[in-house]
Amino acid sequence: MRKNWNKHLAIAASGLAMLSIAPSASAGEIVYWSMWNEQEPAAKEIAALAKKYMKSHPDTKITINWNGRQNQVKVRTALNGGTAIDLIDGELDNLAGGLVTAGQAIPFDTLLDTAGPDGEAKFRDLFLPAALDVAKHNGKVYQIPYDYNPYAFYYNKKMWTEAGVTAAPKTWDELLAALEKVKAAGHNGLAVESDAGVYNIKYLTYMLERLRGPDFLMKAVEDKSGETWKDPAVLEAMTKLRVLWTKGYIPEDSRGFQWPAAQQTIGLGDTSGELVGSWLPIELRDTAGPDFKWGTVPFPTVDGKGDTTHVEVLLVSYVILATSKNQAEAQDFIKFMLSRDSQQEYSTVALRPGVNKSVEWVKELADVRTIAASATLLLAEDDGVKAKYPDFVSNVLEPVNNKAFLGDLTPAQFVDELASRTKNYWASK
Amino acid sequence: MRSARIFSGARGAPTRTRLGNAVTCAPAYLILGMWSVFTVGAIAWVVLGALKTKREVLTSGWSLPAIPQWANFGRVLSENNLGLYFVNSAFAVTISTFAILAVSVPAAYALSRADFRGKEGLTNLFVIGIGIPIPLIFIPVFMLLAWLRLTDSLTGLSIIFVAVSLPFTVYLMTGFFASLPRELEDAAIIDGCSGSQVFWHVMLPLARPGLLTAFIINFIWLWNEYQLSLTIINSGEKRTLALGLYALQNALQYTSDWPGLFAGVTITIIPTLLLYGVLAEKMIAGLTTGAVK
Amino acid sequence: MNSKRLIISFLAPATSLYFVFFLLPVLCTLYLSLFDWSGFAEAMTFVGPKNYVRLWTDPVFWLSLRNTLLILAVGGAFVFALALLFTALIDSGLWGKKLFRFLFFLPNILAVVAVTAMWSYIYNPRAGLLNSGLRSLGFDHLSKTLWTAPDNIFWAMMAAIVWVNTGFFLILLLAGTDKIPKEMYEAAALDGANIFQKFFYVTMPMIWDVFVVSFVIWIIVAMKMFEFPYAFGLIQIPQQLYTLGIYLFIMGFGHREPIYQLGYAAAIGVVLLALTFTLIFAARRLFRRAALEF
């Protein structure tokens, strides 16, 4: 409705007033519902960039609703009431399991083959390696990522160096040796929040990915008999992970830490690091102080198996609704947001890791930028299981893993529990 | 008349002499005192936290901040449209609460006094509503409001506020009316009052404590309500204070800005505190003033 | 109150608003529990009672139910024991009744997230108030307790829930004691009653109807318990803290995972509703006594 009105008004005005209105490529309105909260730095920067865009495209009006992380749920409700929404952003796996699976998103393959916003031969060339592959669904790309958060070990570089860790650990045994040195120097090795099942699962998913490859977890979940869990790698994985606790690299009282208590100890100089996403250095900025030096190592190889260029990431991405009447405008806006200048501003001012490969990240994230640039395979959260079987992850995988990781189940019990719960999960479907 | 004497008498147990207080009530004061200290301590922790730095706030407990960070309040107030949200809340919640009473009290009176077929059933129907989990009706409510073109509006929100508060208020007032003696009504009818006059001039004044209780309870729960508001309100400028605070809290969790969060919480306590402080006394005054002779 | 027209005019506004804007949506949801639906504009698939069958074999549902009932029973016992104790103490003629009444209600005014943040600090195993306090008092072994470890976290949350709610129910009970005429206490004092005898023989019988209303309100609060565990969990609610309200929300609206199973959530809601109603009905039956008339 509004789009037609604008068009008619524009024609009438130019006719009557004989003013020369610069011909615009596409006039229209973009209704953009975002998962950021208005006061978050990312939201402020996106709002500023949108303003910039509207200045250079005077016939396009962008209205942004800052809905917070419940964005997709709000969109769902609103769509049922017939609200017009064009552009949405959200965590890639959430969107994959929601709007994309429901067939509400448009594919971007054509757009990605057009020229890039800074003169790249193809739009798809500007993305960090392998970033677009993880945004695929049934072979087509339905999401355009713009924010890139790798899961890795983020640690206090100074603490490790002073403890005598000279080289970044590349294998599991080297990691254990490094943590031993940290412990000997009188510090705690790794921070763990007992109630953050969503962080603690990364230990398992990475360990299994290294030992058995990126498709193993999905296979184990999809095996309706639950028998794939009995693969010796699973037992081995949990046994190895428990060593972190039994050797004291994860202090025993972590069992009682509620988020964000554990990560605070890193900022305060008690603990050296955590297996978490790239937001941690930014979250701890004020607690840790300006002299804190962050280092990042990818999850190591285990017994010679695995590839450290396989990185599990949390991406934030754009989706355009299939019901949108302003798809062309929205696509143009996306291109603008992914351009070098926009992304650089986003990375520097909002302290977010941009996905454009010609963009620098802030100094706290320098190490992990190198990891991102050399990644060969990006893993969706929980190797894709989260998007496909979210209730399995929420009801079975994360809680059972948390129990075993925290020591309430032995590794053998862990395997049995997973096997029987998987069987029950499929039986009740 | 017996009723008049009872209604005009003093309420509650008599206050004893000061000496008697000190000696025999010491353990009582101790227990009550400890609980009070803990309660006040909670508020103190939050307000103190609002004045600390991010590094201090979650680790320094009840110690005073090294340097009071008044800027936290300034930042929260300026970065958020709290003034606008306050006006929105004041508007929607006040109107809704009055509307709830206007609609529920006559209904409760009818359900407690009148005799008609289906009375029990209707009462039970209202009571069931109390147990219904609100998230379940998000989508149908939104679709209903969308059909009425009332989505993203404080009017639509107010209507839903009234509808979901009805069950509890009707239940409360029905129970309250049931506990009032019938003699006064009978006397009034004998004196020649019509049904509605009995309601307006006899029962309503008597029901004042119940009305105030219902007002306070509904006002406080609607003032803090954010789930329905989250579903129905989309535009930033129509947000209620509770919704604004919810968004603020979420943002601050992601930026680890706990001091800011506590500053926001402190700001929103103030109206509820004032309301309770003022109205609670009125409620008690209403009880002790007594009714007709 | 016999004129039909009067009755209808008194009942009509409430009933029509209630039916259209509340009951109608609820009926939609009941209907929804017989389907599989993500809420996005895909078709709704009819599955009949399958959602309910699935609930029966769902261990997480039973865990949520157990937690909810524990909060109701154990939490309720503590809340009312404390509220009644405080009522007895405050109403015994102490000075400062108004002050105590005001102070005890304060936790209810604080935003839930602030309350849970404070309790999180209290329970912190290293630097938290509880453990530091115990350490300084010399209870070294006790000060090492991990209050929010997986085996304890539910009870830790329960303690916080009791603390928050006691004040509210105390206010309700005190509103009831205000109706009691002074003469009754004076008569009891003349007969030589002490604080507790006065409480049991004068106060309790007189506030019985208020007590029953309060208990019904507690049943509703406990059964619907959602906001507190949600805030206590913050980044993610650990399964040990699941209540029926939380599980419903997670299955229908997702929290950290994109779980959009509205049909299943609706089924949980229906069970929750049926259970609440049964409990309220049972409570009212159990506690029924002739209302005391003057």
Image (cartoon, coloured by chain):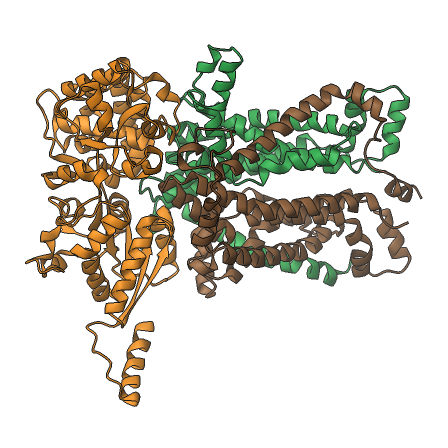
Chain colours: A orange, B brown, C green
B185 or B292, nearer to the observer? B292
> In the rendered view, would you say B120 is above or below C73?
below
**Is A329 placed left or right of A308 in the picture?**
right
Residue A155, percent from left and from top: 24, 29
Residue C263, percent from left and from top: 38, 44
Res. C113 in view:
no
B168 or B220, nearer to the observer? B220
Residue C54 occupies which quadrant of the picture? top left
Res. A39 in view:
yes
Q: Which residue is found at the position 82% from the left and 19% from the top?
A: C194
Residue A97 occupies which quadrant of the picture? top left
- Report the number of discs: 0
Residue B64, percent from left and from top: 51, 32
> In the rendered view, would you say A136 is above or below A231?
below
Q: Which residue is found at the position 74% from the left and 61% from the top?
A: C6
**Is B105 placed left or right of A115 in the picture?**
right
Q: Quadrant of the N terminus of chain A?
A: bottom left
Residue A270, percent from left and from top: 33, 23
**Is A293 placed left or right of B228 in the picture?**
left
B14 or C134, nearer to the observer? C134
Residue A109 occupies which quadrant of the picture? bottom left
Q: Which residue is found at the position 62% from the left and 54% from the top?
A: B97
B196 or A149, nearer to the observer? A149
Q: Residue furthest front?
A: B67
Q: Residue furthest left?
A: A121
Q: Quadrant of the C terminus of chain A?
A: top left
